[in-house]
Amino acid sequence: MRFSPTNLTAPSLIFSFIVGVCLLLSAGTRPNLYAQETPQPAAVAALNMPADTARGVEFYKQGNYPAAIEVLRGAVKGRKDDAQAWLHLGIALTRAGENKDARKAFEKAIKLRPEQVEAHVGMALLFTAANKLRDAEREAARAVSLDSGNAEAHYVLGLVRLRQGFPAKALTEANAALQFNPNFSGALLLKKDALLESYAAASIARAEKYRKLKQPAPTLSPEEHDAVNNLLKEAAESVDKFLKLFPTSPDAASLREQAQTLRFHSDSEVQTAALIYKSDAVTTKAHILFKSPPRYTDEARQKGIEGTIRLRIVLSSDGQVRHILVVKGLGGGLTQTALEAARGIKFTPATKDGRPVSQFVIVEYNFDIY
């Protein structure tokens, strides 16, 4: 993400912080969006900050978080009532992974200036990282109430809603963020994740409905086809827009593959691809012979991340796992380990009329801290 020196302001700094931290918390891939220009002296003056705070901000923009923290700690030591210095110290501490001290800095900023939206957003991010979703919801909702036109506040609230298992509410917040900032990269990926979880929730609810009725699920109606197809296509479009904004993102290749997979699955919902069937359309279902458990990462363990990753995959007629769609992911590197495990699944292909065929299946991986 690039900011010209003439328009770099304090909100721009907050925006870069929010995008970076939120993407670290997101369920899918986590692009690095810090290809920013270093502010020129004239731009620093425009920030309307004391010289030491502005110097700390410059160190932060350069990615020198230890230097930024040292300078900003000196600033708040000399000016204990400087809400802006406390805010930027909280931001720098968060990026350095010093979450406990970051929380204290944000709390101080809020005490001095309760209407400071960015400090509430920072607190919401920290609570989300700690999986304290009720506290995160409170801070995010407070940020939105203070400024209903703030894209970052809506984004953080959407991130919390997604973590709480409310994809429709998360989608509403992602769309609100994009209404106020159409090029908000984090909101584009949040929208994609919310659409995918909405797709998963609808599929699960439909299957559960007919399971309780002890009836086979009927073929989707044209209206149901369109609804499902649109969810996946809209998710692909959100990824496409992200890639247009950030074509050199380190995760561009994986995101392009993800967009292609989304299109494949959306097309298959309308017209089944050659030799790829759903479970109710085969003679014998694919039988999984071996499914290795995914690795639980140190990062996820430290952050206390638990939950279920859900993948929609194709068990191909040739014995290969293909077209892996992340329907629901988790942070902390767990989605990647689940993908690695899924690629190693061994199975006997499904058959139809005596010949092997490819079949869509849903695979889940549960992660619990013991």
Image (spheres, rainbow, N blue to C red):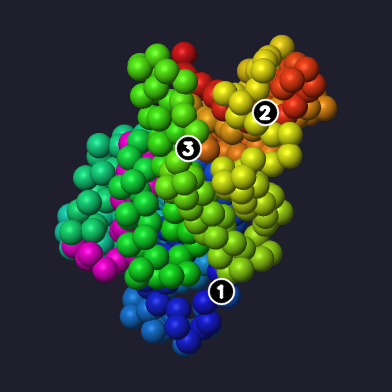
The residue positioned 21% from the left and 45% from the top of the image is 138
Q: Earlier in the sequence, mark 3 or mark 2?
A: 3
Asked if residue 156 lies in the magenta stretch, the reply is yes
Amino acid type at circle 1 is Arg
In the image, is residue 266 above or below residue 69?
above
Q: Secondary structure at mark 2?
A: strand
**From which residue to which does the magenta span run?**
146-164
Specify the farthest residue to the front: 353
**Inter-mark Cα distance, 2 to 1:** 44 Å
**Inter-mark Cα distance, 1 to 3:** 45 Å
Give the main secondary structure of the magenta stretch: helix
Picture coordinates of residue 93 (x, y %)? 43, 51
Amino acid type at circle 2 is Gln
Q: Nearer the viewer, residue 291 or 31?
A: 291
Asked if residue 96 lies in the magenta stretch, the reply is no
Say which residue label 1 marks. 2
Looking at the image, residue 310 sits to the left or right of residue 52; the answer is right
Q: Nearer the viewer, mark 3 or mark 2?
A: 3
* Numbered tag placed on residue 220 in the rendering: 3
The residue positioned 24% from the left and 57% from the top of the image is 143
Residue 99 visible, this angle: no
Looking at the image, residue 323 sits to the left or right of residue 80; the answer is right
Q: Nearer the viewer, residue 193 or 35?
A: 193
